[in-house]
Image (tube, rainbow, N blue to C red):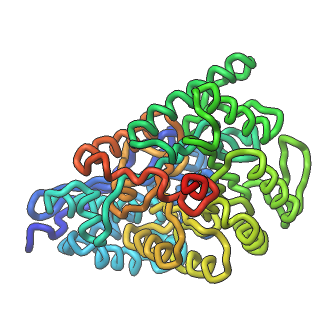
Amino acid sequence: MTMTDIKSVLGRRVWDSRGNPTVEVEVRLAGGATGRAIAPAGASRGTREAVDLRDGGPTLRGMGVDQALAGVNGTIGPALIGQDAADQAAIDAIIRQLDPSPLKATLGGNATVATSLAVLHASAAAAEKPLWRHLADHTRKAPTIPLPEIQIFGGGAHAGRRVDVQDFMVMVPGADSFDAVMEITNEIYFAAGSIMAKKGRLSGVADEGGWWPIFDSNEEALETLVEAIELAGETPGERVVISLDIAASEFEDAGRYRLALEDRTLSSDEMIAMLGRWIEDYPIVSIEDPLAESDSAGMHAFTQDFGERVQIIGDDYLVTNAALVDEAAAAGACNAVLIKVNQVGTVSEAIETFEAAQNAGFRSVVSARSGETEDVSISHLAVGLGAGQLKVGSFTRSERMAKWNECLRIQDELGPDSFVKGTPLANTWWGRKQQG
Ligand code: PGA
Ligand code: ZN
């Protein structure tokens, strides 16, 4: 036995930010080091992502995780005992062999992601390194503090479908420091709240902590976001820009896009034209899932038309899958990928996808889910891989703030020069404007 051999694996039920049960795994190594991680949960999920295994039935509205925990404690754990935690690729290969189904439907992506991440935490602890450094050393990447995308209004599946678009976010690529991003975003977030209050439309927050979106149209949300940026003393399009997650799969049906709020149905071409107008009219620098995951032709056309101007992120479209990234790059769809470890189910596969994106010249955005916890692994992943961008939701609620706060702690070790500033957006209209 060596110090990094796995001695025990314990799965336990804990609870997430929506109050739903979820899987936590604790791994103990022979030398005494321990690691722990919690599975997050999505609400607007891609059909090709790893299965979030739930018990179904009448209790806990079907959301129970007893089967997933039985998989950790009865199948994955016993197979990992005695294995070397320092060899993450071998650990993840064992997990994959235990459930070779393409979507990890037997064990559940929630069981596998918590276990895979817990092993990584334990091996970092054994190496006496913070997780971000352990990851950077392991993958030979240069660690950096990422540029955040921060939600101001939540929508779509995260807000009872009150508006169609899921995330209205700001980015502050013109800030000199990560701290300045936090400060400027705080001002914008509360400016947006005061505008909503003045209009008599303040009504709490959506799943990721952004203001609940009482608007008459999707564009009214965009107008209000611009107003909030101005009220915060910023000029939209200068230091501060807008980022949207359309999450279009959520309102697409048989190739048509149903904008419930505006009571209209658009074809793929009309959807592209509408988003094109938004890009003209608002300082939008990044758009995620502009078309549905099934609408590859639309994704190609949109990327053809706007890929030089804005970042186009595949989330439901690429589901953190390396083969799908390769395919999209070859076909000219998207120019960025969202990295959500639980979409693919293991750390090694998420890193594979990140590397596929690097090879394809795609940007990467490490991302949380709408159901989150105090787990801050993704902050370390974003820093350790030098991914460049991080998306974790809004600027309230501790399951969100924990991730931003962890970046601040890591920055104290890495130094202020480690912040990437606006570099991930260099090849967008914003980046070109900076070059004069
Ligand atoms: P989800 O949403 O976690 O509910 O899937 C997040 C996103 O779409 O980026
Ligand atoms: Zn998304």
Residue 256, by quadrant, is: bottom right
Residue drawn at x 84%, y 58% is 273
Residue 299 in the image: x percent, y percent? 73, 69
Left or right of 14 on screen, residue 329: right
Residue 191 in the image: x percent, y percent? 60, 25
Residue nearer the viewer, 374 or 76: 374
Residue 28, by quadrant, is: bottom left
Residue nearer the viewer, 407 or 159: 407
Residue 380, by quadrant, is: bottom left
Residue nearer the viewer, 119 or 191: 191
Residue drawn at x 28%, y 53% is 36
Say if residue 46 shows up in the picture.
no
Q: Is residue 301 above or below residue 169?
A: below
Residue drawn at x 84%, y 64% is 268
Which quadrant is the N terminus positioned in?
Answer: bottom left
Residue drawn at x 39%, y 77% is 98
Q: Is residue 186 above or below residue 143?
A: above
Left or right of 423 on screen, residue 248: right
Q: Residue furthest front?
A: 436
Residue nearer the viewer, 192 or 260: 192
